[in-house]
Image (spheres, rainbow, N blue to C red):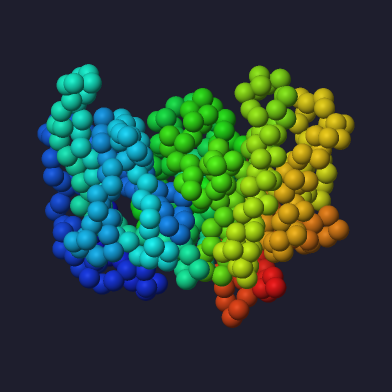
Amino acid sequence: MKRREFLRDAAIVAATGGISTDVLSATLNSSPGMSETEGGQESGKASLIDSEPVLQNYAATSMGIAFSVTDWANGYAIFGEKPDLSDGRKVWCGGYRMTAMDNEVIQIRLTGLKPNTLYYYKIGADRIEYKDGYHIRIVGNEEKPQTYFFRTAGEGARSHFCVINDTHASWKAINPTINKLMALQPSCVVWNGDACNTEETVAAQKRIFFKPEIERKDFAAHIPYLFCPGNHDGRGLANRHLERIWMYRQPEERQPRDWDLGRNFAVRMGNIALVGLDTGEDKLDGNPKFCNLFVSEPYRVAQQTWLRDALRQPEIASAPYLVAFCHIPLYDPNPKENPGDVYPNDKDAKYTTDFAMWQRTCSKLWGPLLEEAGCQLLITAHQHCVRFDNPNNEHKWFQIVGGGPNMTGKTPGHFPTVIEGEIKNGKLVITVHNIYSGEVCGTVTFPVRF
Ligand SMILES: [Fe+2]
């Protein structure tokens, strides 16, 4: 990061109270003239670490840190509560038994963290020369000079989130969208699906999640993200294993029965409970185009069981505000559109009169549970057109559909959005920012749910 950029960011962060001035001065003093990967980079070789860290899976007691590498690397993070990391602990990538040495992406899981606590961290990696199981050498080490930081979730955290969606690797839309997020500095961002198009290679995925062609490469180095996949995030050979890029959530967050549901989250952030669901593919599992390669239907059924329990967790049940997120809308005023409960849009399918199947759609499976729990707001995506759906006979929750990547300004409602949620004067205030025009295109206010 350039010194000028860092000063600007530091001013924003300091103003929001996210970091002490000690670490600012410490980092500033070490910045000028330093190479990005000082400490072991061999001449003639590309930097081993070629991205900023990305904070994945915002939670109260854990945090995922991922970054891109260019060669075989055994990555790690050093983290602690002191700005100079004098209390720092080193955590290697991967889990038990062996590290997740990799030549594309390093994924580190920090666990046993304290809720609503500011942590500082650095990232680094050993460059590994691996000939065979007995002939392994460390041939270099790189550590990013920057000290980064994050704050964990929890009841004491600041109640402030933002949502982006349907970014579709469109840099023209993503650049101002991310700039808006950096200005708003929320406690976390929900990436509500369709970050991808159809990604066949890991390189293409890395471009989207770690090396975006935007100004703020550090978009997720301090602000943690929550991820709700969209239908496009499962398309393409590489996306069949998106967990190589965006790790699954920690298994201890859910019962053993639900361990395979690695994308669902139920996170308490201040006075708001954030619940994430995965609507999966928008085509029927039986659609001949996809050759039985998707099993979204049992996945949605399994999420119903998870959701029922998640909504009863004490920290979720007691939250004054409950906001749910999923990519495909669960309601559409036009039944010919493509929300999660209407199949006729799947033009290749011939099973749309199957009543039992209708009973297993996202809306039927999850909608009543969200209503029963007093969910005030569902934030969705998918249609690339902003929409506000008031509660009606079919659903008690308010629904907001976020915009898409269109930056032409030609079609009403078709522009990128940042949906911001914040508690103000005892109410949840949702502000929808139009990223094309820079204006606010809607606000909705919610009282506490009980
Ligand atoms: Fe989309």
Residue at x 65%, y 36% (from the top left corner): 299
Question: Looking at this view, is 61 or 64 the one in front?
Answer: 61
Left or right, 186 with respect to 14, comes to right
- On the question of residue 183 being in view, the answer is no
Q: For residue 340, which quarter of the picture? A: top right
Q: Position of residue 45 (x, y in %)?
A: 18, 31
Most extreme residue toward the bottom is 425
Res. 354 image quadrant: top right
Q: Quadrant of the C terminus?
A: bottom right
Q: Nearer the viewer, residue 28 or 71?
A: 71
Q: Residue at x 55, y 37 (%)?
A: 260
69 versus 293 height, above or below: below
Q: Is residue 267 visible?
A: yes
Position in image of residue 325 (x %, y %): 62, 53
Q: Residue at x 38, y 58 (%)?
A: 113
Give how far across and how far down residue 197 sits, in percent.
Answer: 55, 34
